Amino acid sequence: METVTVERQSGAARRSGGGVAEARSLPICIEHLRVVYKAANRKAAEKIAVNDLSLSVEEGEVFGFLGPNGAGKTTTMNVLLGFVQPTSGKAEIYGKSVRDEASRAELGYLPELTYYYKFLTGRELLRFYAKLFELPRAEAEKRIAQALKLVEMEQAADKPIRSYSKGMQQRVGLAQALINDPKLLILDEPTSGLDPLGRMKVRQIIQRLKDEGKTVFFSSHELGEVETVCDRVGILFNGQLKESGSVSSLLEAYQCNLERIFLKVIGFDEDGNPLSGKEVA
Amino acid sequence: MKKSFAIAEVVVKELFRRKDFYVLFIITVVLSVLMAGVNVFNEPSVARYVKELCLLLIWVSSLVIAITTAARQLPVEKEQRTLFPLLAKPVRRSQVLIGKFLGCWLACGGTLVCFYVFFGILSMSREGTWPVLNYFQALLLHWVMLGIVTAFTILGSVMFSAVSANITITFALVAGILFLGRHLNKIALQLGEPLQAVVYGIYYLIPHLELFDVRDLIIHNWPLIPWGVWLGALVYGAFFTALFVWLGCVRFKKMLVH
Amino acid sequence: MKTALITVLLLVCCFGAGTMVEPRLGALELYRRHEGSPIKVLLGESRRLFAGQSFAKADAYFHSGMYPSIFDNTGGKKASAMTDAARGEKGGDHVERFLGEPRDIIDRFSRSFFPSEHKHLGEEKHEEHFPGDGHDHQEHEHGHEHGEEHEHGEEHEHGEEHYEEAGGKDVREILPWLQLTAELDPNRIENYVVGSFWLRNKLGKVAEAEQFLRSGLKNNPNSYEMLFELGRIHDENKKDVTRARNLFEAALARWRDQNSKKEEPDNFALQQIAMHLANLEIKEGNIQKGIALLEIVKKVSPAPAAVQQRIDELRAGKETGSAVNGSAEPVRSAH
């Protein structure tokens, strides 16, 4: 309870017990991250996408990164992936700065919108990404076979990606995220656009990865899934981390489900009406 | 370099699966064969005009392939969002750009070999000779020229947001240099200062693509270019290619991809 | 099934309408104007703009690709060896030295990548050398020794380049461009004259040369140049004296019609026509007629003394049928 209170009050403190030396080996370590987008029009105001964000993710845990649209989740992920340079602050993956491409060697990434080279087959795509990880050919073929089996894409592996459905593209996306047997997976809304069966399969894969000891950092709007799969969650709003902690401790503290906690944190009641200042957590 | 070659391999696959090359090759073959079938005063062994037309088609086709392929690489990757899973891998942006350049350039080399083999067969059927060394010199010079154009186009693709703008500007510049590059010094002499200095400056700064256009030597069966001079042209072309690729890397590193 | 039937019905209607309309349209002047070659249909009269380019291309081919651009200074010369040879003239070749010395390092370097040496198709270049200049004083490939007069009384100065006939048939390469020029501008007389000359003289294609000239005459019935060339074909190749005479006389008549009132008449053409007709008449034994024609030649010839000498010889009965040196045959060595 106390730990949760600390995190609720500051919204930016590292999980208790974490020292500097330990932080360096954390899968994800973000400190006072700030990302400001300059407006194209000089008269328009700057947009602060991420505002003094600090969080860390422990080895082997599944961390749910939550927040409404425009909260800064994708920007934070883009910083971790090296797509966007932070205005200030620091972000590291396994102790390596995100500006160093070597930080992505142990990383697997599944984007929200899964578009891949339409003229390649699924197998050719995986081979290409395997080469980028400099995997030896034999090892690469073995990993490709394993990944295709895991995502149940063996039959369609040699067909061009342009012939794939949305679900198949999502699955081949998962396969490419796993090709290097990463220690850390960053998944951006992995169940977006999938039917219930597809969502269930993705949940199963995430659970399996967790059982293998991998760290998963994913964003999602499916709070029911998050509640089921995640060890810890963080709720982002207006670029700031408003709440973070283990799922169980948050549920106990708020005495309601994760969806209501989410709404309360971002300033709405269960009916979607804005809360007054005193009622906001 | 392995990562760049992996990216290059994907570019080559894209070019040959998009079928642009096949269309242009078939057009070249059909037009050349048609022209070769024209009756010229019942003289069957007139060869040079066929060679000229064939080489013109080869040059136009190769420039179309080089410029359109190179101009599309990074903007289309960004638009179709295939760039993000790529950059999420342990690969530097400069490696991505170099890989794109290598892929376009190697693909151009492959298409040139096909075109020049056809040209060789066509001219041999007319003239009965096959000056392999001359064709080899011409092919390599052509390939290096396409390297400069490809690198320049890729630089344009990280500077201009619209693909069409990049293609138009590159075509205009390439055509301008090919037609006028050799004559800029003569034009400069006819101008007064300060225009003369400006034109002379442009004359010395631009990559002289017309150096690599040795079609007239091939058409009219001139002897080989001295090998030292030929190598010098290749080095000259390599320098400009490296310059444009380096500028592209510098620009791409700072570019917002999201 | 329904779609297929409708499609077939529509196709049948279109075909039927076409067969009904086409003969009626064919009778219309407007429709007939659009008949002809693809170039005529596509470009219309604007095709004539490209004829000059096409003819220049033939000249460029004659010079094996070495050709001045619009940016090059040709010193005001416009004559081309390709045209001059056909006309039997000896003028400066505008292609000869337009390049000049390299202006800068790039210019110097670039000379290896495009044709930069003056030469003509079907001819080899020779250079005269001074005695004692270190070169072997051997006979040239075509049997000329130093100082020896060439066939037509020309003597080349020491150190001067000149071109000797190599008997090569490479000159055929200019033919497609001459054929295209005729297609683009059927009224360009020079094109037919040049084309027929090279077809006849270098390639031995007399029938093709005649056909080319006749197609040109269809579009240019009053062209004395083409009538003269036809006359030469019948005289020199077909040995048909009667027809040759008729053609030369027709050419002469056309020349008079077109040039008599001009301030600068085409005296060179008159000289050529009259000389050939004179030689023909003299060969046939019509000496008086020949002399009368030589009198015409004398008025316009650059060497009237030589012509007068010929006339005197004819009158004295010494000469029977040989041509006057240097004024009737085309110049073979172009400078």
Image (cartoon, coloured by chain):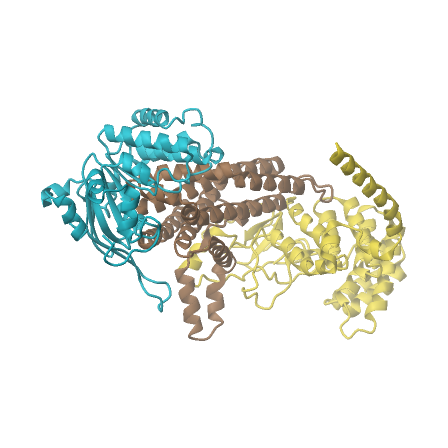
Q: Is residue A57 left or right of residue B130?
A: left
Chain in yellow colour: C
Chain in brown colour: B
Q: Is residue C190 left or right of residue B131?
A: right
Residue A106 spot, x, y in % from top left: 24, 36
Residue A154 spot, x, y in % from top left: 41, 24
Depth check: give the residue in front, A56 or C253. Answer: A56
Residue drawn at x 15%, y 40% as measured from the top left: A25
Question: Does the image show residue B226?
Answer: no
Residue drawn at x 56%, y 51% as measured from the top left: C125
Height in image: A11 above or below B99?
A: below
Q: Is residue A260 left or right of residue B119?
A: left
- The quadrant in which residue C281 appears is bottom right
Residue C8 spot, x, y in % from top left: 78, 36
Residue C19 spot, x, y in % from top left: 86, 43
Depth check: give the residue in front, C114 or C19. Answer: C19
Colour for chain A in the figure: cyan
Depth check: give the residue in front, A216 or A197. Answer: A197
Q: How many marks?
A: 0
Height in image: A198 above or below C47?
A: above
Question: Does the image show residue B99?
Answer: yes
Depth check: give the residue in front, C48 or A241. Answer: A241
Considering the image in quadrants, where does the N terminus of chain C appear? Answer: top right
Residue drawn at x 41%, y 59% as measured from the top left: B206
Q: Is residue A277 left or right of residue B117?
A: left
Considering the image in quadrants, where does the C terminus of chain C appear? Answer: bottom right
